Image (cartoon, rainbow, N blue to C red):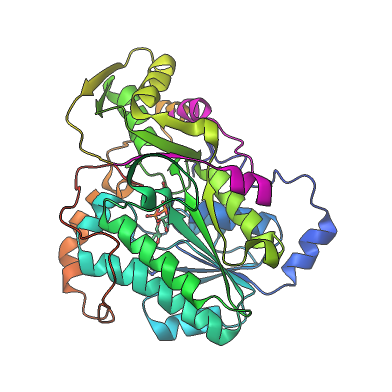
């Protein structure tokens, strides 16, 4: 089991008393979708550690490795199912106190493989969960969105900025955000969390994320190629995302109901070329090659003042620290081969493509209003 980099994930909330923990264990469970994923597998452990009961809903597209060793935990319930199935979701939300919705087809490249699957999962699936929450009287639904919704922009961006998505992935997230906010009322409080591009090690490693894959290539191949390099991108450690989600879960409802938060930190807006420099300083044998061909057009510099002022969030991890953590995981053999398809959503789904297109049990695809017409998909990009 992976310990490097996630050893601090659980158990570091020293301020919480045993009483508080005990109180939570008697509360209604929190439903976490996508719990077997890169972010979800850390969120679930953090929740358990804080004393919550957790119900997990995941179709295990990438297997159950990330959560297998906690499935016997007395406060965890596992539902292996597809959240596009209304009957499943109706049962899954019954009796829960709140929902953290992270399940999705994730990343520009993975989402471009099968439009129907992407739209039905990221958009329609989110609406199904929200409708079930409303019906069951579950008030708080914390939604994992992405700063990719800002797309390509030369402005400094905050939560009120215009959106300029450049992928189907971002479009489905925007459509889902809007659908959630349209359902908001006194009894239903969606909270939108737009994560910066994540980095760092997790119980489900992902080596299709910019910092992770660049570090792995530097360590294993002694070379990183950066396309373009002048694009701004905000980054955040996967464990800091998990902490932010718990802040959104525990904040007084009036502070967060119907609110959107960028999740990250100002200092961790970097040009991709700078990321290469940080990695090279820590993996000195690696060469950084700048290729002027820009494959990934996303370019956005994001402000994170709101999550600091409203939720008191501060990122605890640094990009350099994570590069070292990742380097150790690779050097020590915790990750045997970063090129393994399991660690790359696009490659893994390519392999499963035939199965996916044969799927017959998904609900009919619902028309989704696109923010911009989709004229192209970027299959080579390492999106989040
Ligand atoms: N990782 C990032 O850099 C990043 C950045 C911004 C936003 N996000 C968002 O955070 C969330 C989690 O991302 P991640 O990196 O952990 O993704 P991931 O690909 O590692 O995990 C996604 C999980 O969702 C599950 N899933 C997918 N479709 C499902 C369905 N129909 N029913 C049940 N389960 C389903 C998969 O089995 C998988 O376990 C996503 O919503 C993503 O859009 C991630």
Q: Position of residue 148 (x, y in %)?
A: 37, 49
Q: Position of residue 308 (x, y in %)?
A: 64, 44
Residue under the point 20% across and 43% down? 380
Quarter of the image holding residue 256? bottom right
Quarter of the image holding residue 122? bottom left
Q: Is residue 92 left or right of residue 61?
A: right
Q: Position of residue 262 (x, y in %)?
A: 52, 49
321 or 367: which is nearer to us?
367
163 or 267: which is nearer to us?
163
What residue span does the magenta drawing correspond to? 298-326
Q: Is residue 228 left or right of residue 203?
A: left
17 or 2: which is nearer to us?
17
Query: Is 89 situated above or below 246?
Result: below
Report the residue that reaches farthest toward the top: 285
- The answer to whether residue 20 is magenta is no
Q: Is residue 28 left or right of residue 38?
A: right
Q: Is residue 269 left or right of residue 115?
A: right
Q: Position of residue 355 (x, y in %)?
A: 19, 67
Quarter of the image holding residue 20? bottom right
For ligand 1, which image quadrant applies? bottom left
Query: Is 188 situated above or below 302?
Result: below
Evaluate whether residue 97 shows in this view: yes
Residue under the point 24% across and 50% down? 109
Query: Is 204 situated above or below 365?
Result: above
Evaluate whether residue 82 shows in this view: no
- The answer to whether residue 315 is magenta is yes
Number of numbered discs overlaid on the protein picture: 0
């Amino acid at each position: 089991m992976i310990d490097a980099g996630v050893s601090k994930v659980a158990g570091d909330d020293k301020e919480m008393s045993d009483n508080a923990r005990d109180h939570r264990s008697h509360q209604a469970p929190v439903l976490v979708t996508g719990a077997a994923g890169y972010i979800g597998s850390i969120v679930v452990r953090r929740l358990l550690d804080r004393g919550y009961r957790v119900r997990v809903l995941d179709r295990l597209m990438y297997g159950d490795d990330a959560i297998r060793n906690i499935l016997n935990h007395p406060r965890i319930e596992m539902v292996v199912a597809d959240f596009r199935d209304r009957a499943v979701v109706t049962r899954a939300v019954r009796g829960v106190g709140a929902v953290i919705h992270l399940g999705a087809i994730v990343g520009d490249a993975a989402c471009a493989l099968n439009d129907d699957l992407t739209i039905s999962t990221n958009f329609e699936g989110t609406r199904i969960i929200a409708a079930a929450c409303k019906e069951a009287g579950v008030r708080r639904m914390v939604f994992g969105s992405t700063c990719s919704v800002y797309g390509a922009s030369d402005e400094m961006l905050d939560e009120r900025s215009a959106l300029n998505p450049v992928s189907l992935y971002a479009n489905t997230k925007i459509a889902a955000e809007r659908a959630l906010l349209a359902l908001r009322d006194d009894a239903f409080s969606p909270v939108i969390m737009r994560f910066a591009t994540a980095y760092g090690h997790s119980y489900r490693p992902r080596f299709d994320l910019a910092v992770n894959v660049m570090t792995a290539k530097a360590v294993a191949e002694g070379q990183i190629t950066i396309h373009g390099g002048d694009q701004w991108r905000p980054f955040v450690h996967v464990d800091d995302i998990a902490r932010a989600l718990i802040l959104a879960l525990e904040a007084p409802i009036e502070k967060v109901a119907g609110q959107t938060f960028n999740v990250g930190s100002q200092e961790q807006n970097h040009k991709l070329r700078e990321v290469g420099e940080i990695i090279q300083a820590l993996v000195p044998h690696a060469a950084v090659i700048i290729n002027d061909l820009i494959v990934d057009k996303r370019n956005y510099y994001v402000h994170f003042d709101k999550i600091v002022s409203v939720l008191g969030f501060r990122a605890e991890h640094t990009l350099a620290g994570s590069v070292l953590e990742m380097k150790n995981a690779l050097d020590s053999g915790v990750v045997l081969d970063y090129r393994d398809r399991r660690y790359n959503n696009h490659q893994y789904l390519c392999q499963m493509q035939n199965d996916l297109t044969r799927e017959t049990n998904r609900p009919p695809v619902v028309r989704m209003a696109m923010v911009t017409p989709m004229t192209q998909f970027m299959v080579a990009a390492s999106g989040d």
